[in-house]
Image (spheres, rainbow, N blue to C red):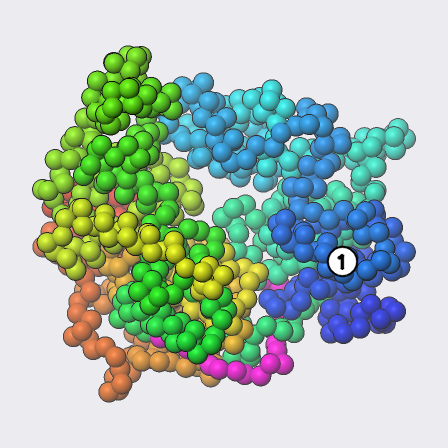
Amino acid sequence: MRHMDEASSDQGGRTAGLNPGQRAAVEHRGGPVLVLAGAGTGKTRVITHRVASLLDEGIPPWRILAVTFTNRAAGEMRERIEGLCEADHNTREIWVGTFHSICARILRQHGTPVGLSNRFSIYDSADQQSVMRKVLEGLNVSPKMYTPRGVLGILDKAKNRGYGPEDLEKLDLQDPVLSIARKAYEAYQARLRAADAADFGDLLLQAVRLLRAARKTSTQGQLGDLDPVARLLTRFDHVVVDEFQDTNPIQAELVDLLSSDAELCVVGDDDQAIYGWRGADVDQILLFGDRHRGTEIVKLEQNYRSTTHILSCADAVIRKNRGRLGKTLWSELGPGEPVRVLMLRDERDEARLVANEARAAIDEGVDPPSIAIFYRTHAQSRVIEDELRRAGISCRIVGGVAFYERLEVKDVLSYLSVLLNPHSDVHLARVVNRPARKIGNTTVTRLANRATEEGVSLWTAMANPEAAGLAAAAVRRIREFVAMIGELQAFVDEVPLPDLLAEVVERTGYAAALAVEESDESHARLENLQELSGNLIEFTEERPEAKLSDYLELVSLVGGERSEGDKERAVTMMTVHSAKGLEFERVYLTGMEERVFPHSRVLDDPVQMEEERRLAYVAVTRAKRHLTLTMCQRRMLYGQTQVGSPSRFVLDLPAEATDQVGRAVTRSPRVASPRQAPVRKGPAWQNDIVYDESPDAPFTDEELGDAVEEGEGVHLFIGMHLRHKAWGEGELVGWHGSGRSLKLQIKFPGRGLKTVVASFVQPV
């Protein structure tokens, strides 16, 4: 594998204004080229100039393929190519599109061999779940054990790797999951074929199967040249792929097939490969040179976005990853301001500081959309949203919705509303079949019609379901639902609000339905429900005498206030995953503690930890001039208070590029692994963390307190070591309930995360 840093010549001014690395990527010819494009190094400019340069050389537009991941990126690519070429070339003949659109185009023209007409339908997520629900019903599979979304997740993972039903054992599934998934896969595909339909995974898989078969045919006889699919293998002279680090195996194979007779140029950044959880495989870019002999590597390292201090911090974070090809970003923008690192008392102080600084900046004339607030998980946004609202600042949430508008939060709040007022038809209709309990739209419609005829509420009609003409099975389910609501109503004035919420999510089966999915989305939804519990704890602490009606009133008013404001003049909020590809003048990266960022779920997985480190790198490199990292001494998150220790990513930052504010983080020559830190009651700080005790320090140890929770006569804290007779010693990561219902979530080495009743373990 050869490395190339400079190009040899300028082609008629097309590459004027490009730096040496960019010029090399544009002008390279004669074999495959991997363009390692660091953050903010102008990769889109390279891609569009390369295509324009090829057209200038006389390459017919129809013999060029340019592929990217999103419709927005594809549209921008085509627009910029047209802008460069003006009227010189017919750019409409270039194949520019996403992986899925390119595959759909192939299947529309040639899909008959895989059972698709030129009018086939493409099923979206809702369509897929509807089909899978019928499949699972046909297999007599319990929806409590296998949800449509969960099984579809297995199928999607298989299709991303090019696996059919017969290959599912390659996913390391065990029976009975393996046999159920295989039967569901076969039945699901049969239903799609009968409907002349394909889902998103099929677009890729079926197109690749077509091209595989065509390649085999074209090598077995001269008639292969007559096959129109085989001609696709030799159609293109040049193939350019953007964001190659985000490809999965089936996408990489598609690229290889379509570039069989073409020069292949892939552009990407292994340091920004952050989508492993949705099937992307960083090995596709790391091992590209092994699959394509004679690959040139061109590195784009001059960054046009960020100052030197910010880039130094980014480099310090990412250089600890072993799985990378290696590059170092540099900038001519000067050192700029040091990266600020702030230690705050808790998440409320953190949110208040961010909101106050954003307010001050806006008052000084800073454009609100140039300010961004990042967090690792959506659940962290609630407190920040609250403080921004109090400061009179509109916020725009990218890649998500406001906390109280999230589906699972609205569902549970609707349950609470029904307990208080079951005659609220809107809330009752929302939850009657959430989670799914086989009370369908037909049943609800008949009950609603009966209620309208009688001039009563839906709840009143449910008291006599036979009168609505329901079948016996539907009557039984309605009566079970009504009985469940009645049981929960008995708790309203008898238990604290957080305990009432716990009873709702448990007795309704809501939490169990999410847990069984075992998907990243379901984990996020569970975290949001846990954060709602934290919100209730906070509310009851501030207003001990308040009732459920007071809380629901407050939430309704907050939701109304959030809907107001000019979103074009709003501060941007998002998870770090949603921030990729964006840039902002001012960035606040919040929650920089161990178990928050990096997330607690990745601490024991080296592969996922490398992706988490890449995620931190992405977060840092979004900032142009001002970057602030915040962390807390204690944080209530997911309804639990945990003692905070600075993220390992914070400990990696170079002192010369940072400015420690308040209780500064000080590093010893050797940084111990956070997982090897001694466990003690109270704040479990690492030995190498020292806090500045100057008069300006905003908080004292007395103000911090023990930062622990009471439980069964023992102080519980995140990181506490406990012993179980069967599973040995483990580490406490969370808990819920109280008294004899207190349950602990404990991570046991080699056995994973377990939920156990507190009375079955002993403190170490």
- Against 142, residue 430 (above or below) is below
Q: Does the rendering let one see residue 719? A: yes
45 within the magenta span: no
Residue 234, percent from left and from top:
83, 42
In-front residue for pair 468/712:
468
Q: According to the image, label 1 marks what residue?
A: 81
* Relative depth, front residue between 185 and 681: 185
Q: Residue at x 25, y 17 (%)?
A: 465
State whether residue 322 appears in this view: no
Rendered-image quadrant of the N terminus: bottom right
Amino acid type of the residue that numbered disc 1 sits on in the rendered structure: Ile
The spot of residue 617 in percent (x, y) is 51, 66
Q: Would you say residue 337 sits in the magenta stretch? A: yes
Location of residue 270 by image quarter? bottom right
Residue positioned 23% across, 47% down in the render: 552
Q: Residues within 10 Å of mark 1 (few under 14, many from 20)?
A: many
Q: Which residues are magenta?
A: 323-342
User: Element under label 1?
Assistant: helix
Q: In this image, 99 relative to 258: left or right? A: left
> Which corner quadrant holds the C terminus?
bottom left
Q: Is residue 489 left or right of residue 131?
A: left
Q: Is residue 226 above or below residue 762?
A: above
Magenta: main secondary structure equals: loop
The residue positioned 83% from the left and 32% from the top of the image is 228
Please name whichever residue, 402 or 171, is drawn nearer the observer in this view of the structure.
Answer: 402
Query: At which x and y percent is residue 164?
Result: 59, 30
